[in-house]
Image: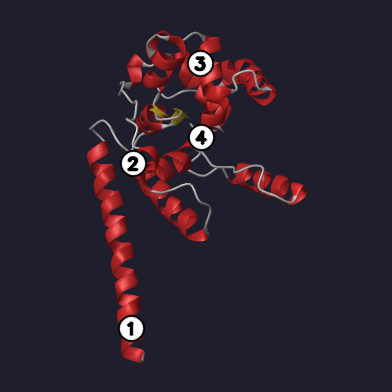
Amino acid sequence: MKAFLARAVMLVLGVILLIQLWIFSSLVWWRTHPVETTMFMRLDYLTDFNPIKQQWRDYDDISNNFKHAILAGEDAKFIHHHGFDWAGIQHALERNNEKGEVVAGGSTISQQLAKNLFLYNQRSFIRKGQEAVATWMMERMWSKRRILEVYMNSVEFGKNIYGVEAAARFYYGKSAKSLTPEQAAFLAALLPNPKYYQDNRNDRKLQYRKRVILKYMNGTQIPE
């Protein structure tokens, strides 16, 4: 029995090590290469086998309006933290305890990107732990500019729609580089629930979120 348990522990540790090596090697490759697929994209494709819409755009080919909007909507402290916004996490925990359910996540853009690249959407302690490890590695291997660039190119904006270029083409018929402040705020406002908002563009929460992003986006600091 002891020998069986020892082998089982070694197997689990081996799998964990392989996962870390996969994440590390992927981050090394993606430091200089476009990210054309993520775990979220693969899982999305496997649910309905419809083609994924995604077109990579370099950082300078994306409107600064959108960069400001995405930070205002998702992570205003992005430039200043090292992957984790501890004050934001504490605030989210307090809100969740107050409401008796999960109503806020407190995840930074770095954490969201780590999840999108390597993990899945179900909440669990194992997933959150792996997300933390991947976030820690990413923040030490990539610049803030690179993290934001990959995030903007891989985040979901609707059914099978990933990245700001595909979103700009789908919603406005234009490139991501030419997004106006209002258009950028709308796309950023979609992110909490993009598949729902895609078909409910006049939803009150979406419109309120868009107005808030428009109000605060110029106060955000983007990587140069």
Q: Is residue 136 visible?
A: yes
Q: Which residue is mark 4?
A: 80
Which quarter of the rendering shows the N terminus?
bottom left
Which quarter of the rendering shows the C terminus?
top left
Q: Secondary structure at mark 3?
A: helix
Foreground of the two, 82 or 8: 8
**Image check: 116 left or right of 15?**
right
Q: Secondary structure at mark 1?
A: helix
Of the residues tagged 3 and 2, which is closer to the observer? 2
Q: Position of residue 155 (x, y in %)?
A: 43, 32
Comes first in the chain, label 1 or label 4: 1
Distance of label 4 from label 3 (alpha carbons)? 23 Å
* 3 and 1 marks in contact (CB < 8 Å): no
Q: Amino acid at mark 1?
A: Ala
Structural crowding at the residue carrying mark 1, measured as other residues with C-alpha within 10 Å and reported as few (<14), some (14–19) or many (≥20): few
Comes first in the chain, label 3 or label 2: 2
Q: Which residue is mark 1?
A: 6
Of the residues tagged 1 and 4, which is closer to the observer? 1
Quadrant of the image occupied by residue 107 = top right
Comes first in the chain, label 2 or label 1: 1
Q: Which residue is mark 2?
A: 42
Foreground of the two, 50 or 4: 50
What residue appears at the point 37 percent right and 19 percent down from the top-left corner?
Answer: 165
Distance of label 1 from label 4 (alpha carbons)? 44 Å
The circle drawn on residue 184 is: 3
